[in-house]
């Protein structure tokens, strides 16, 4: 039996417009949200941002802040990217404690590390910043101080703060690149020592701040710049104008492929578009002494017109994980047997133009011909790839190959050893 209780009450509330609209939406002590409970989230006064759980794989949730009024529900911050919360997990603003995320068994997964004092309320501001405050409104913790991969307008990045790229397009856990202002005042894009993240690796875009960097500012007009110790603007990260009034939303994100991108969401548009990005060519920018480079081991990187790096396997190699392009490639044929020199004739060389794997070489010859270079690799059971340059230089390369790149600027020919048939 169905009971209908029609409700024809329309309430028109004429509210005075407060300039500080965000302060009128306090999240009170004891409030909580449960993962898997679709309807519950905490929304900013403008409704532009929401805080709650987003399911990122079946049964597992990210405690996150997202753009709430666009179909993509793009995530701008998350608490537990490296420790997903199972269905039934709960985040609570616990009285006398903090904002705490626990799994269904009550195990703590994450908590906001308050700067001291007891929380009185929390609020999700219209900027996308989640704050936990004391009774006197002094902020004890804010999500803007602990960015994940994204900066929002009005957010700053101080010395020692960083953005860490997600691992892949669909996996939000901490990945292989970071954008960091070091405690010594230098700003750069770095490769991380994944999966540890406790020391900086190679930098692949240095903003040459000479230790003068004080903070990175992403201001309300959408300009990203580095401010020096003396308060002056040392440099802009992107050479672009500030956002026009046609822009609805914007964000800066260090993406899984190591590219720092400035996205805008124009009013009335169907999605985000890239306004600027850096570095110009990630494939040629990254050169690591240890580590695989942008792409995984044995693959090579090609920067295409879509402004994205694409990771390719050379002939005779296949992706380790067919669903993860950046994961590297394996040799899909048995290697040449050094104990059996006669099996040399079972191998052949395939040619790739304008491809190179710098730093993977174990021998270098000068003043040789292309044919000599070819033969010397074919005859050497250790040689996986031969590289020839018109200058007469020839290199023998060993696996796993690293820093692979394919670019018109690469003046070299690669001979890839493969097994015949
Ligand atoms: C939010 O909570 C603080 C502390 O209790 C209080 O001072 C402030 O007036 C509250 N704001 C609103 C709009 O309720
Ligand atoms: C995401 O990537 C990390 C790092 O490789 C891995 O440990 C984790 O299992 C991945 N998560 C998913 C859901 O695939
Ligand atoms: C952002 O910075 C630019 C350049 O310094 C400045 O012209 C602009 O007025 C700033 N916008 C705001 C809202 O402060
Ligand atoms: C290469 O050969 C030329 C001509 O024989 C010679 O002048 C030059 O010094 C050689 N270069 C090297 C690096 O051996």
Image (spheres, rainbow, N blue to C red):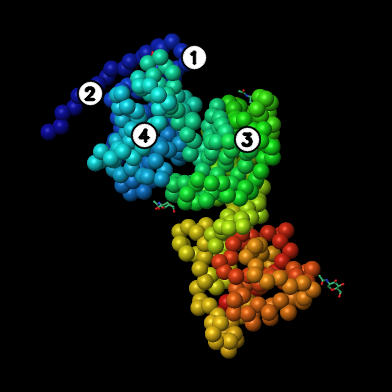
The earlier-in-sequence mark between 2 and 4 is 2
Callout 3: few (<14), some (14-19), or many (20+) C-alpha neighbours within 10 Å?
Answer: many
Task: Identify residue for label 2.
Answer: 6
**Element on which disc 3 rests:** loop
Residue sitting at 57 percent across and 33 percent down? 159
**Element on which disc 1 rests:** loop
Q: Is ligand 1 within 8 Å of the beta carbon of the residue shown at mark 4?
A: no
**Element on which disc 4 rests:** strand
Residue 59, position in %: x, y? 31, 47
Front disc: 2 or 4: 4
Residue 37 is marked as none
The earlier-in-sequence mark between 4 and 1 is 1
Front disc: 4 or 3: 3
Residue 185 is marked as 3
Residue sitting at 66 percent across and 36 percent down? 211
The earlier-in-sequence mark between 1 and 2 is 2
The Cα–Cα distance between marks 1 and 2, rounded to whole angstroms, is: 36 Å
Front disc: 3 or 2: 3
Q: Quadrant of residue 46?
A: top left
Rendered-image quadrant of the C terminus? bottom right
> Ligand 4: which quarter?
bottom right
Q: Is residue 45 left or right of residue 181?
A: left
Callout 4: few (<14), some (14-19), or many (20+) C-alpha neighbours within 10 Å?
Answer: some
Task: Identify residue for label 1.
Answer: 19
The Cα–Cα distance between marks 3 and 2, rounded to whole angstroms, is: 63 Å
Front disc: 4 or 1: 4
Callout 2: few (<14), some (14-19), or many (20+) C-alpha neighbours within 10 Å?
Answer: few
Residue 365 sits above or below residue 148 on the image = below
């Amino acid at each position: 039996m169905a009971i209908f209780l029609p409700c024809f009450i329309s309430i028109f509330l004429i509210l005075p417009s407060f300039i500080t609209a965000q302060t009128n939406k306090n999240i009170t002590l004891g409030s909580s949200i449960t993962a898997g409970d679709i309807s519950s989230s905490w929304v900013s006064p403008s409704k532009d941002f929401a805080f709650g759980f987003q399911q990122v794989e079946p049964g597992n949730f990210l405690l996150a802040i997202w753009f709430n009024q666009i179909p993509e529900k793009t995530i701008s911050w998350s608490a537990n990217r490296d420790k997903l919360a199972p269905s039934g997990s709960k985040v609570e603003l616990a009285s006398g404690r903090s904002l705490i995320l626990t799994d269904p068994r009550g195990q703590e997964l994450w908590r906001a590390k308050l700067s001291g004092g007891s929380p009185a309320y929390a609020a999700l501001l219209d900027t996308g910043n989640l704050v936990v405050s004391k009774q006197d409104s002094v902020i004890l913790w804010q999500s803007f101080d602990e960015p994940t991969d994204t900066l929002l307008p009005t957010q700053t990045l101080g010395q020692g703060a960083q953005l860490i790229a997600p691992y892949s397009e669909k996996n939000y856990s901490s990945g292989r690149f970071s954008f960091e202002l070091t405690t010594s005042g230098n700003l750069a894009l770095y490769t991380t020592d994944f999966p540890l993240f406790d020391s900086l690796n190679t930098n692949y875009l240095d903003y040459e701040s000479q230790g003068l960097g004080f903070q990175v500012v992403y201001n309300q007009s959408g300009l990203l710049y580095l401010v020096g110790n003396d308060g002056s603007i040392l440099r802009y990260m992107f050479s672009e104008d500030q956002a026009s009034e046609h822009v609805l939303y914007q964000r800066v994100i260090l993406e899984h492929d190591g590219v720092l991108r400035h996205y805008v969401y124009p009013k009335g548009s169907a999605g985000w578009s890239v306004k600027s990005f850096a570095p110009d060519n990630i494939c040629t920018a990254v050169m690591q002494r240890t580590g695989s480079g942008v792409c995984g081991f044995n693959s090579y990187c090609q920067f295409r017109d879509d402004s994205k790096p694409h990771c390719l396997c050379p002939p005779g190699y296949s992706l380790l994980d067919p669903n993860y392009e950046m994961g590297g490639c394996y040799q899909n044929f048995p290697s040449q047997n050094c104990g059996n020199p006669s099996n040399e004739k079972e191998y052949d060389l395939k040619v790739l133009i304008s491809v190179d794997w710098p730093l993977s070489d174990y021998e270098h010859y000068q003043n040789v011909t292309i044919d000599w270079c070819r033969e010397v690799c074919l005859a050497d059971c250790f040689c996986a790839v031969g590289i020839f340059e018109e200058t007469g230089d020839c290199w023998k390369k060993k696996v796993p190959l690293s820093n692979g790149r394919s670019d018109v600027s690469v003046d070299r020919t690669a001979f890839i050893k493969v097994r015949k048939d």
